[in-house]
Image (tube, helix red, strand yellow):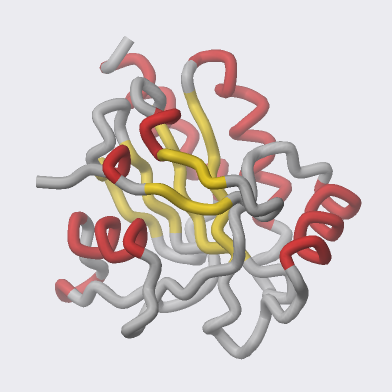
Amino acid sequence: MTTLHDHTALLNNGTDVSMREFAGKVVLVVNVASKCGYTPQYEGLEALYRKYKDKGFAVLGFPCNQFLSQEPGSDSDIASFCSTTFDVTFPLFKKIDVNGDNAHPIYRYLKASAPGILGTEAIKWNFTKFLVGRDGKVIARYATATKPEEIDADIAKALELAA
């Protein structure tokens, strides 16, 4: 059985990152987009990251352009937008696919571990969120419309249980 920690991904600057770096942390993995009605969720994601990062929590943002081309920019454009507009400091990765034949292995793992409504694995839209425990296993999947602040209690519980 694999976990999040068995994977790697490229940061938006091209640096290869082993997810083992996040072993022992609670992680929220989110497929993000800059031109989506849910883009203001960046603010809530950053607030959660700042609130809990010193307690062993991380947010990992994976830009994706598969939903109505709502993430059309380059990786540097995305980083600049997130930094300037929402003061994002959590890690942003290179733009990836979350569905289909070219879906990133991290998303293949996440979707298989926590299927969505009616057991479907496909990501339905931008800002689908996966809460991953310190052991690298998925705790929960949250729909696009779930605001980051609504996940706060689950994050706190995951941090407390594993402390």
- x and y, in percent, of residue 44 in the image: 66, 45
125 left or right, relative to 121: right
| Whether residue 9 is situated above or below residue 69 in the rendered picture | above
Residue at the location (49% across, 26% down)?
57
| Whether residue 139 is situated above or below residue 93 in the rendered picture | above
Residue found at the very far bottom of the displayed protein: 68
- x and y, in percent, of residue 144 in the image: 49, 66
Residue found at the very far left of the displayed protein: 1
Q: How many marks?
A: 0
**Residue 159, image quadrant:** top left
**Residue 112, image quadrant:** bottom left
- x and y, in percent, of residue 14 in the image: 64, 53
The C terminus lies in quadrant: top left
54 left or right, relative to 77: left
Residue at the location (61% across, 50% down)?
11
**Residue 113, image quadrant:** bottom left
Residue found at the very far right of the displayed protein: 84
- x and y, in percent, of residue 45 in the image: 62, 44
Q: Nearer the viewer, residue 37 or 101?
A: 101
Residue at the location (78% across, 55% down)?
79
| Whether residue 46 is situated above or below residue 36 in the rendered picture | above
140 left or right, relative to 15: left
| Whether residue 162 is situated above or below residue 27 in the rendered picture | above
